[in-house]
Structures are given as C-alpha cells and as structure tokens.
Image (cartoon, rainbow, N blue to C red):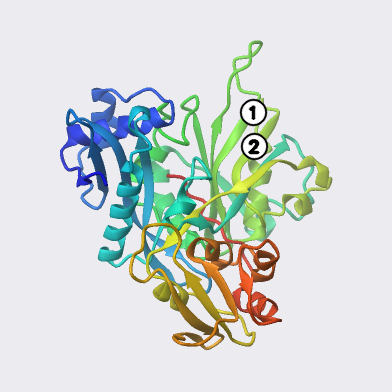
Amino acid sequence: MADVEVLVDLVDRRAAFNVFLGALHKAPVGIEEWREGWVGDDLFDDECWLGVRGANGEIVGTAHSFPTQWTLPGGARVSASAVTGVGVRADSTRKGRLSALMGTQLGQARERGDVAAVLHATQTGIYGRYGYGVVSRSETVRVPVRAEWRPECGPDTATGRRVRMLDRAEAAAVLPVLQERLAGGRPGGLTRPPQWWRHALEPASGATPGFAGSGYQGIAVHSGTAGDDGFVVWVSGKVGPDRDWPAEVGVQQLWASSAAATAGLWRFVTGLDLVDSVVGWGRPLDEDLDLMLADSRQRQVLGRGDELWACLVDISAALSARSWGSGDPVVLRVRESGPLALGDGAGTWRIGVSGVEPAKGVLPDLECSASTLMPAFLGDRMPSRLCTAGLWVEHTPGAAARADVLFAVAAPAPWAGTWF
C-alpha cells in the first residue's frame, strides 16, 4: 500500500492539483494563476490535501476534501467531507495508490467526526469499491427563449414577486447566506465554504471545474412577499461564426424555495434578449418546468444521470439523524462495501417511526451493502425497487413495502445542487 501524506506546502498542493487536472485531460495551472486564483490571501486550513509520491519524490496521486454540512430528510444537518481533486497520474495507476488515498481520506473523516463523505464521480465504476453510492440524480434541460409560461408562473408586482440583477460584489454578500438557507430545505443540500464562492463568482477559468465559459456571468435574485427566496446564475455559451453573441446561455446555479420562485427565475432567464435557448445543467428531478409551461414540450430533457455520491462513515449516526415515515418497523442489515473497512460500516438496525436502534443478534428483514443503501438513504429510490433490481435482499415477505413507507420523502427530491 502506498504511503499517503497530508500536503501542506503550496508547491506540493499545486503539483497535486495539476495531477488532478491531468487526470481530467486538462492543462496544468500556471504559478501566477495558482497564486491569484487558487491560493489568494488564505491557506484555508480547513481543507485537506492528500498526496502519494513516485520513485523520484514527485506527486503522482492526490485527493482533496473540505468540510460541509449535509442536509438529511427531516432537515437535520450533519458534518460531511466534500471530496474532490481525486486523480492518479496515468503511469502510476493500478498500483494501489487510489485505494490508499481513499482509505486515508475516509479514516480522517471518521476521526473528525464526519458522518459522511460526498463527491461527484467522473466515472461510475470507481467509487462503489470504497463504499460510495448514488444518493441523488439530476437532469439537464433546455427551454427556448420566449417560451410561453402559464400566466401565474413568474414575477408579478401585484403579488409582490420580482426579479432583480446583482453585480458580483452584491452577489458575494447576498448569495452565500441565501443558498445556505435554501440548502437546508432540501435533502442532499450542501453548505459552501468561502473559497467555493470565491471561484464561483469570478470570471470563468479554463482550469476551474464546472465554470468554463466566456467569462460573462449573469446573476439575479427572486423576491417574494417574505423577501429573497431564490437566485439564478447563468453564463454565456459559445459564440457562433455568424454572430458576436451566444445562441445559448447555461444556468449554472438556480436555487428557489418554492415553485413560484422557480418559475419566476426560469421565466426571467428565458426572457433574455439575443439568445435562442437556455440550458439548465444538473437540475433536480422535481423541477417540473413542463407543468409550468403552456406547452410542456418546450422543456426538453437532454440527459439524466447520477448527481451526488455518498459514503456513510458512521452509518449508525447517519440513520439516527434522518427522519422516517410512519410505516411499521423493519430490521435492516448493512454489509461492508469494498476493502476499506472502517469499523462501523456494517451492522443491523431496527428502523421505525420512533427512530433507529441496534438490533444485534436479530435476523434481518432486509439486507444491503453500504453502497447500495445510498440510493434509498435520501429517498431517491424505494427499497422495493432496489430489491427488484437485486441490489437489496428481502428476507421477510412484505418487508420491502414496509421499508418504502419508512424511507419515503414526500418533498422535495434529494439534490445537492453544488458542484465541486
């Protein structure tokens, strides 16, 4: 197993970041861009950079994480590690380096008292080996500019709803507070550290994951009778050969506390001049734009897939922190996933409306692995469907149907809404 070290020196951190960019087939970041765009005036001591070295002492593998608060069904927030920057140099793979990095990272999360580690997976075949599983999904949609919205959907001064644009300085003061409040109302929602916002509200950089573009950024906030209740950030797409302006803009972020705020923000961005369409990337599955449009076919789904992955480093604490439906109790056994045993990654629990308690020595009604628990954990998939797919095992007839009621989350659908 490779030796993993915590990287503190900024030279090592930049080398690690460039290993990550190389794994994504992106160009390395230069020293000036690193100093100005990534280090700034702060070292961000709450970040954790891990690295493994090659035969000549150079960084050949890395993993990075920062702390966040993760919202569970019922509104409880738990500490989690947001994992990113994972990569191993192409000539150093298949030698156990990634397993060493993942094991060290999850062990550190457990020592810090984190309940979970969360990430966005560039490849789906990697992280299931380490106990991660998909907890939320998203879709990418396109809506034409000048789409016809139902009259009640959108800004209306008579009802106190309006949309106003912000510059970056105003956005830096308003959006972090607003997003943190809105993320607390949706299972899967994540809080964002200051360094996340610093990158998100700067002109786009080609090296910044998820923020490539022309550098233009539009920002608007929706307000209702109770004050600010949503915001949208959009960027311009590529300029065509026959025009100086983009044919399409992309919704980079859109958070809203209600269907009215969602509709108002979408109506605003689809009312922009000069462009032909608006694409929303990674939108929640319950953002029912087709129901808000006069013609439901004007909302095109371009793709749907996994959004957030999670590994519960303390399953007992995670199960105890979320709320449960009113169904009859079930006994669930969870097996370890993969080679990275954390000491509390397996066990048997009785789950009911009154809470969760250990059930040692009791035969389980249902059984799954730590990674296949994830699709049901936030309510994205029902246990009965996971049993049908062969991912869970039903030992007691009818137990999956009981578990469906317990795991169900009425609204909203799980969604992290934060890329990192």
Residue plotted at (38% across, 22% down) = 27
The residue indicated by pointer 2 is: 279
Query: Residue flagged by tag 1: what amino acid is it?
Result: Glu
Q: Position of residue 418 (x, y in %)?
A: 47, 49
Task: State the count of labels.
Answer: 2
Q: Residues within 10 Å of mark 2 (few under 14, many from 20)?
A: many
Picture quadrant of residue 49 = top left
Q: Is residue 370 visible?
A: yes
| Rendered view: 368 above or below 92 | below
Q: Position of residue 88 (x, y in %)?
A: 35, 35
For the C terminus, give its image quadrant. Answer: top left
| Disc 2 element | strand
Whether pointer 1 and pointer 2 mark residues with C-beta atoms closer than 8 Å, the reply is yes
- Whichever of labels 1 and 2 marks the residue nearer the N terminus, that label is 1
| Rendered view: 395 above or below 283 | below
Disc 1 and disc 2: Cα gap in Å?
A: 7 Å
Q: Residues within 10 Å of mark 1 (few under 14, many from 20)?
A: many
Query: Residue flagged by tag 2: what amino acid is it?
Result: Val
Left-right relation of 225 to 96: right
Residue plotted at (33% across, 57% down) = 106
The residue indicated by pointer 1 is: 248
- Residue 113 numbered tag: none
